[in-house]
Amino acid sequence: MDFKDYYATLGVSKSASEKEIKQAFRKLARKLHPDVNPGDKASEAKFKELNEANEVLSDPAKRKKYDELGANWRAYEQAEARGGPNPFSGQWAGNAGGASGYRTVTPEEMEEMFGGGPSPFSDFFTTFFGGADPQTQASRGGRGRTRQRPGRDIEHEIELTLEDAYHGATRRLSMAHDEGTKTVDVRIPAGVNDGSRVRVAGEGERGSGGGQSGDLFLRVRLAPHQVFERKGRDLYVKAALKVTTAVLGGEVEVPTLSGKSVRLKIPPLTQNGQVFRLRGFGMPTVGKPDDKGDEYARVEIQMPTELTDAERKHYEELATLQGDAAKSHSAA
């Protein structure tokens, strides 16, 4: 079993920041995802390696342990197995008062230091970070039985459109485990907000020794929308009005996230920036799709950019009717 260079797998340096590691993982994951490369076993294997590298380097505790032992992990394993002098000092070995000045680290201590439990990754990951099988533990002076440990929860970010959040959506995810890649359909409920977490029970890290698997949590990130702005359960949209409609009154069509426009009645002499409420056309409440917020339409009066001769004549007549305004208009 060879040492795995997780930094090389992600294509980053050992000094890479958490942000750089996250960006590198996302870029490669989009390229190697099984949904993008159906039936490609090589891409599937690389995707699994990518997940394993990200699991270690994105976790400060695991990364610290990985960096401290690095390629010397095998020497540590062998020294600990034969009960001889440990090649590492300080936190990796304790003084038991024996002739060598070191003692063998027990399987329980190994589990404590490295997290314990089998992972959904490679044998290297499992051996390095704990979770050895009962036979291996017995050969190292352990009690010869696997200690039951629950799997950890895992969190991933998922991007949704505002329409997805309004109607609810389904996302198909590919989960890499030791037994292969598992496809899971996740239902995103209507009404989720930016930063909401959607729980997928039992799809986190696998438990060890019969322990329960952890959960997968999808953290929602809403993409900006070109038309609507969301504030809690309410939506805000611009309503463009012609000058004549604003002055004389009339109707204007206002878009909604339901997919249908509604006709908004505009009273005479409506001012620029005036806001109208459309009750019940906002975002639904999670678990209560019929309980919706409101939509607010803000008036934006559209000035003409060009005039026909007939339109100009009418505006000039209007200026004449307005007296002083007509004089100012003529002077201009």
Image (spheres, rainbow, N blue to C red):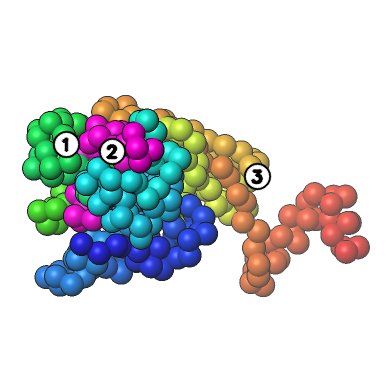
Per the image, label 3 sits on a secondary structure element best described as: loop
Badge 1 crowding class, 10 Å Cα cut-off, few under 14, some 14 to 19, many 20 or more, is some
Q: Amino acid at mark 2?
A: Thr
- What label does residue 272 carry, if any? 3
Per the image, label 2 sits on a secondary structure element best described as: loop
- What label does residue 54 carry, if any? none
In this picture, residue 147 sits left or right of residue 332: left
Find residue 275 and report its horizontal and vertical position in percent.
57, 37
According to the picture, the residue beneath numbered tag 2 turns out to be 104
Find residue 326 and report its horizontal and vertical position in percent.
84, 55
According to the picture, the residue beneath numbered tag 1 turns out to be 141
Q: Earlier in the sequence, mark 2 or mark 3?
A: 2
Residue range (magenta): 98-125
Q: Is residue 122 magenta?
A: yes
Q: Earlier in the sequence, mark 1 or mark 3?
A: 1
Badge 2 crowding class, 10 Å Cα cut-off, few under 14, some 14 to 19, many 20 or more, is many
